């Protein structure tokens, strides 16, 4: 075989896509309940947008972006995440002027990151995410987290762990940054070249460096928790109270920093606690990003959101042994013998479909037995058999596949009969 799907991508075949559609339906239903509306943004954006929003020192921007020049010599990037695009669109379309704030948006679509392929980690993956922009109320933080938990619960997942942290505001981060520089600077030669650049620009990134993760200085680094000011602490306490009131269990982990630069205050991740789940257990990540609208040239509009991979949600369902009910089956399968019967059958099929009945027939001139086997495999509720004799008499043989009872009925009546039986049955 000459061609294969690119590494880190996958074909979703009909045996899988129906499950995706179910999950996507759940995400839409939950968003409707919370009044989040769908936004669709382009799959590529100006490269500069991600450098600004996600951050120059992040792994995503430094190593993982699919960046290319178009024929007009513009640098474009396949979106590695959705928040930057949504916030760009919020600013560009002046959504800050909408009467109802915060503006509550959701999106679902492919994202692209050049990452090492492993179970649950892909180079093209689908993120469902929400963004609530225009409110700095801790109650909306709890709402966004609750929405994510609801999606998982509706999909049937039980083994979930919600981890939250506060990253504080700009002031706390500045004093924490100074403390980190002081901590790492004397020994920075022990660290990788990336960390050397990170030291001045964003020392927080050293804490989640994949190369230097074993260095004891990481463990002993000053914790952000000790630099939270009164306001940030009060905000975090309020978020926790709202979560508790909503009966959402959580654990606080002060080491949760997240891999994107735009976060402050609330940060959270939802993990799968299922034993069967692979090494990567994070299902969903999100947090607050006050200041991001200004960073990309708009007025102040504090925001919070999350994104989850649909691939990982389905893997978690598999690990917990949760399944959806099977696909809807066919209402009718038309079996025909001979050219005249085929013509009658094709016309009948048109009528069946026009009346909303899921139906199909054979297009490979197979023998009756083979056609009946297809009807069985496709779990058709009814089989309609038409041969020369039936054509002559203007009837069809209608077989109910649940009890195998069959009846000759007039061709003109078959659609009505099926509609009635299926409604009753
Ligand atoms: P993130 O933590 O980079 O955050 O990604 C969020 C989620 O996307 C992850 O928890 C995981 O489910 C999924 N994900 C990320 N990379 C991959 C991959 N290579 N393969 C499969 N799934 C992956 C963000 O993207 C932020 N934009 C989330 C956000 C929205 N924060 C605020 N609003």
Image (cartoon, rainbow, N blue to C red):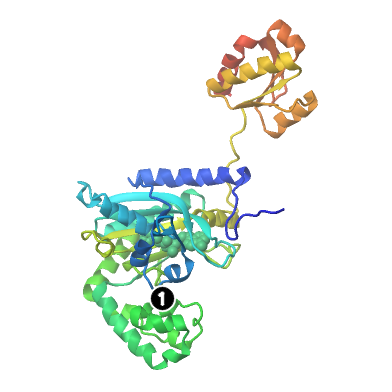
Q: Is 249 drawn above or below residue 323 in the view shown?
A: below
Coordinates of residue 280 in the picture (x, y in percent): 54, 66
Quadrant into which the C terminus falls: top right
The front one of 174 and 197 is 197
Q: Residue drawn at (37%, 78%), measured in percent from left and top?
A: 204
Where is residue 326, by image quadrant? top right
Q: Which residue is mark 1?
A: 255
Q: Is residue 58 left or right of residue 15?
A: left
Q: Residues within 10 Å of mark 1 (few under 14, many from 20)?
A: some
In this rendering, the count of numbered labels is: 1
Q: Is residue 82 left or right of residue 96?
A: right
Coordinates of residue 288 in the picture (x, y in percent): 32, 63
Residue 303 visible to the viewer: yes
Secondary structure found at label 1: loop
Q: Residue furthest bottom?
A: 186
Residue 160 visible to the viewer: no
Q: Residue drawn at (44%, 71%), measured in percent from left and top?
A: 62
Q: Residue drawn at (37%, 66%), measured in percent from left and top?
A: 51
Q: Is 194 drawn above or below residue 281 in the view shown?
A: below
The front one of 209 and 49 is 49
Q: Is 204 drawn above or below residue 383 in the view shown?
A: below
Coordinates of residue 154 in the picture (x, y in percent): 47, 48
Q: Is residue 186 left or right of residue 298?
A: right
């Amino acid at each position: 075989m000459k061609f294969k799907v690119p590494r880190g991508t996958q074909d979703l075949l009909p045996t899988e896509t129906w499950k995706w559609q179910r999950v996507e339906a759940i995400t839409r239903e939950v968003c409707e309940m919370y009044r989040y509306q769908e936004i669709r943004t382009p799959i590529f954006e100006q490269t500069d947008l991600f450098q600004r929003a996600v951050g120059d020192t992040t792994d995503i921007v430094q190593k993982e972006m699919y960046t290319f020049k178009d024929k007009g010599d513009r640098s474009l990037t396949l979106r590695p995440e959705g928040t930057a695009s949504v916030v760009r669109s919020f600013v560009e379309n002046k959504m800050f002027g909408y009467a109802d704030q915060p503006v509550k948006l959701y999106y679902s679509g492919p994202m692209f990151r050049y990452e090492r392929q492993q179970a649950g980690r892909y180079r093209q993956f689908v993120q469902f995410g929400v963004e609530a922009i225009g409110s700095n109320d801790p109650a909306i933080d709890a709402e966004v987290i609750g929405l994510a938990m609801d999606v998982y619960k509706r999909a049937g997942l039980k083994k979930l762990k919600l981890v939250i942290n506060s990253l504080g505001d700009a002031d706390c981060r500045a004093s924490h940054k100074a403390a980190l520089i002081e901590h790492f600077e004397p020994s920075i030669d022990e660290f990788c070249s990336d960390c050397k650049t990170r030291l001045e620009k964003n020392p927080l990134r050293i804490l989640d460096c994949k190369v230097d993760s074993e260095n004891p200085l990481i463990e002993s680094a000053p914790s952000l928790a000790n630099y939270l000011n009164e306001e940030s602490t009060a905000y975090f306490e309020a978020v926790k109270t709202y979560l508790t009131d909503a009966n959402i269990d959580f654990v606080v982990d002060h080491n949760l920093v997240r891999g994107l630069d735009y976060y402050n205050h609330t940060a959270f991740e939802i993990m799968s606690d299922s034993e069967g789940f692979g090494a990567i257990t994070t299902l969903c990540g999100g947090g607050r990003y006050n200041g991001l609208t200004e960073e990309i040239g708009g007025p102040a509009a504090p925001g919070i959101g999350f994104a989850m991979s649909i691939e990982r949600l389905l893997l978690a369902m598999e690990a917990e042994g949760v399944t959806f009910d099977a696909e809807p089956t066919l209402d009718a399968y038309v079996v025909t013998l001979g050219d005249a019967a085929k013509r009658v059958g094709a016309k009948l099929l048109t009528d069946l479909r026009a009346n909303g009945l899921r139906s199909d027939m054979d297009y490979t001139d197979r023998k009756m037995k083979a056609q009946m086997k297809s009807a069985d495999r496709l779990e058709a509720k009814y089989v309609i058999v038409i041969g020369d004799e039936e054509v002559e008499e203007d009837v069809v043989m209608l077989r109910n596949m649940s009890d195998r009872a069959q009846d000759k009925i007039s061709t003109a009546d078959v659609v009505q009969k099926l509609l009635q039986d299926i409604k009753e049955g």
